[in-house]
Amino acid sequence: MLSALRNRTYRHLFTAQVVALAGTGLATVALSLLAYDLAGANASAVLGTALAVKMVAYVGMAPVISAVADRVPRRALLVTMDLVRVGVALVLPFVTQVWQVYALVFLLQAASAAFTPTFQATIPEVLPDERDYTEALSLSRLAYDLESLASPALAALLLSVVSYNWLFTGTAAGFLASGLLVLSVVLPRPRPVERGGGVYAKAAFGTRLFLATPRLRALLALDLVVAAAGAMVIVNTVVLVRDTLGRSTGAVSVALGAYGAGSMIVALALPRVLDRVDDRRLMLPAAFVLPGVLGLLTIGLAVAPGAWSWPALLAAWLVIGAATSAVLTPGGRLLRRSAGSADLPAAFAAQFSLSHGCWLITYPLSGWLAAQAGLEASAAVLTGLALLAALAAARLWPRTDPTELEHTHPELPADHPHLTGTGGHHSHDFHIDELHRHWPTAPRTSVAA
């Protein structure tokens, strides 16, 4: 997995991602403590609303920003968004009202919604080799997992010597370091794409690309599978461990650590696995593992907890983490196959927005069901949702999924440059774009608008 890091540009970008994620982790802990200071017993409601604000910013802002991102140099955009996040982090310690928290969280996450898809779309151009890019995807997955494990520990260490307000300073330092690292490299220039319909059409293009491409429709269904299983872990672990199993606060961290460990183990193995197995044969079976484990959890919750329950929960979370990584990590490869270089930012922005839309559904669903009907009902509903989404993904993703497709263009004049030397029908690496608005349903099927 080290060959990708030999590329200086990628090495600096990956380091920028790691330090920014460390800063984000510190901010998560600091926001929890700030919410408690401002709202006391209502801190959970404040954090829940802040999480919803975060998701709304992700879902709404990523496509809009992608519509104008091709007009701005990528390095300038990334550094500017890091500076915005630095400013927000430095202001947060001084807020005195809950609404100010919501406003600043929205601004912070809007900047992240601009930064992250642009960053993700840059990596396949920096690393054109397929294996290097696969390694980069695995490293990115590891970075996210390490952030979820290491940042709370780092926050606890800092809190032993400073107040939580200083954690926001650490957050600002992480974003500032990220900006400096991005500034230290030369990035590929975005390729302006002319589309009719103005900004709205450009913002909607990424979503249209997803809905028109079979493998990307399947990827969206897979995102829903992951969101259903992940919501059960993230939202309900504390209740499962503390109330159902009656274990200590420290056991919550152990359970979440098992989830992260499963993800990391698979992320480390994926570059070798994907040399031998194609994306579909890996991602679909892993997707069916998730409702399987949730179903077993549902059955376990229907039985009185016993001595087996704690190790069973750790094993379940380990497997969910592993299967989640097997589904999510290769997703960038599908996006790379499904969009031209100029359209990669729109594709990644759509993925960012639509995948977080799935979480916006499953987060409240998981928490509300657990509170109103119990953990067993929550697990059962999420099992059903994950299973339906996995079945949809298997149906949407064709067994035969070639890169090149034969098609015709009856809407184009015979002398159009795209048809030069083809005799009216042709085949090539097929992507949805201005000349190819629909997916061919069979060889030589028209792709006219």
Image (cartoon, rainbow, N blue to C red):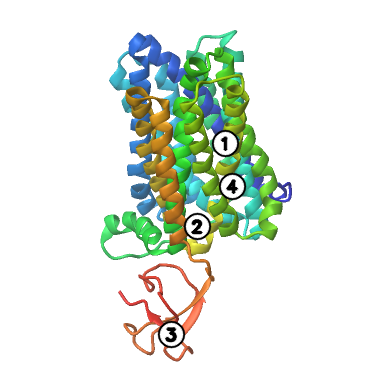
Pair 3/1: label in front: 1
- Residue 419: tell me if it is visible: yes
Question: How far apart are labels 4 and 3 at the CA level?
Answer: 40 Å
Q: Whole-percent x and y of residue 438? A: 36, 70
| Residue 110 quadrant | top left
Three-letter amino acid code at disc 2?
Answer: Leu
Q: Whole-percent x and y of residue 347? A: 44, 56
Query: Which residue is at 55% across, 45% downward?
Result: 289
Pair 4/3: label in front: 4
**Callout 2 secondary element:** helix
Question: How far apart are labels 2 and 4 at the CA level?
Answer: 16 Å
**Residue positioned most to the front:** 303
Identify the residue under disc 3. 419
Q: Whole-percent x and y of residue 118? A: 47, 48
Query: Which residue is at 44% across, 27% downward?
Result: 235
First of labels 4, 1 by sequence position:
1
**Callout 3 secondary element:** helix
The disc label shown at residue 326, or none: 4
Identify the residue under disc 2. 335
Pair 2/4: label in front: 4
Asked if disc 3 and disc 1 are in contact, CB closer than 8 Å, the reply is: no
Pair 4/1: label in front: 4
